[in-house]
Image (cartoon, helix red, strand yellow):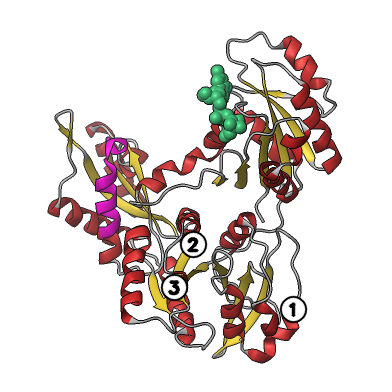
Amino acid sequence: MLPVIALIGRPNVGKSTLFNRLTRSRDALVADFPGLTRDRQYGTGKLGERPYLVVDTGGLVGDEQGLEGLMAQQVWRAVEEADAVLLLLDARDGVNLSDEQIAERLRRSGKRVRLVLNKVDGQDVDAVLADAFALGLGEPVAIAAAQGRGVRALIDRVLAELPPEQEAPEAGEDLEQGIRIAVVGRPNVGKSTLINRMLGEERVLAYDQPGTTRDSIHVPLERDGRHYTLIDTAGVRRRARVSETIEKFSVIKTLQAINEAQVSILVLDAHSGEVAEQDATLAGHIVESGTALVVAVNKWDGLDDEQRQWFREQLDRRLPFLEFAERHFISALHGSGVGHLFDAVEAAARAARTRVPTAELTRLLERAVHEHQPPLVRGRRIKLRYAHQGGQNPPVIVIHGNQTSRLPASYRRYLNNFFRRELKLVGTPIRLEFRTGENPYQGRRNRLTPRQQRQRKRMLRHVKK
Ligand SMILES: Nc1nc2c(ncn2[C@@H]2O[C@H](COP(=O)(O)OP(=O)(O)OP(=O)(O)O)[C@@H](O)[C@H]2O)c(=O)[nH]1
Ligand SMILES: [Mg+2]
């Protein structure tokens, strides 16, 4: 599981600014998916040695209302789910009573807390550092989040203090576990019903175990001689009880599950009549994570044609960036369409593992460029020369050329769609990475002068004899 880092502090100390810094590396990716908005509260980051999850929170005010109110409860929940808490302080304001009260409360939480003194740019911070130190939460780390100063050192330090990550699951498929499938969706879309349906009646009772707040349950499953592991974020419950329970929804838990899975099934509720904000946010997280995806539109039973048409339009309008995934219209309650989900999961997992030879990718790139040239930038044409595969799960296509950082998002999308179509990739996002520079294969061997070439020929003649 990824370590979870929560950002806590008074209003305006720079939590969101730091959050953006810690998650920024993903910006370029998002540009390839029109309509995808980023979650500005939960994000994945990989600034340091290993990936992590970050949670931004609303500002806390140190009085009783501010520490116990409705808003604050959200913050404490984030603390509860975190492995490390960063308490931000504002070097311009100095340490005040609010900070002291928040610090006191954090100390009682028993969590690993690290003090972060922000906005140290252009400040003489010695006095504030001493005040911060006096909060009794250890040595503060000074940063300037707006400029990015000290942020890398901070995250390195925080990650180093955390216990080493448990063995990360293999990117590929494990024979015993089979494909790992995360079943995700907002509360009450029917995740538990679907999981029960996928498992079959008799299996359900055995897995009636509550998870802790942030841990998902892994349920082994065999179907047609194939193994799968369902990662359940809702908690599988006895059938009779499914409708009665109000599940405790946790974005962190969902993100962890997506991260461990090879394929996510995003469950939507057609009965609700709309694709909600939270659906779009979860969809965005899945795309950012790069796992393969199958969309399951649940509660399709009992809708008339008009309602169905309406929901299809909602999907196109609100989740246009999911067009790479298969959509299945199902009824978890009655079981219709559920069997096809397994085929879709298999297909998506296969697509995610695709391997394409360099020669073929380069040929495709040449065709794409031929059909639609990259734009001119300041009178010079952006050149894209060749492509190779940089990874699987999801497929990464590395494109070499010059001025590639100037490629507009629209052209990246064009390339993305082109490769997807030509490689017939359904169910997996693809990642494009661009490299500017010389052909690395060209520079690898020293170029020989004519004289050296003659010498070399002579030498080789000797060797042959
Ligand atoms: N000078 C300076 N300003 C900063 C720094 N970090 C953040 N700011 C500014 O401080 C203001 C508040 O930043 P936010 O990141 O929105 O603060 P926040 O803690 O998320 O605030 P709330 O969400 O309202 O609690 C913004 O105007 C930032 O530009 C910094 O390192 N130096
Ligand atoms: Mg904020």
Residue matched to label 2:
291
**Mark 1 to mark 2 CA distance (whole Å):** 27 Å
Is 271 on the left-hand or right-hand side of 166? Answer: left
Question: Badge 2: few (under 14), some or many (20 or more) residues near its Cα, within 10 Å?
Answer: many
Is 20 on the left-hand or right-hand side of 247? Answer: left
Question: Badge 3: few (under 14), some or many (20 or more) residues near its Cα, within 10 Å?
Answer: many
Please tell me whether mark 2 or mark 3 is closer to you in this view: 3
Residue at 72%, 39% in the rendered image: 85
Where disc 2 sits, the SS reads: loop
**Mark 2 to mark 3 CA distance (whole Å):** 23 Å
Q: Amino acid at mark 2?
A: Thr
Residue 169 quadrant: bottom right
- Quadrant where the image shows the C terminus: bottom left
Expressed as whole percent of the image width and height from the top left, the position of residue 195 reads: 60, 79
Task: Indicate which disc, 1 or 2, sits on the residue closer to the N terminus.
Answer: 1
> Looking at this view, is 430 or 248 the one in front?
248
Q: Amino acid at mark 1?
A: Asp
- The outermost residue toward the top is 124
Q: Which mark is residue 270?
A: 3
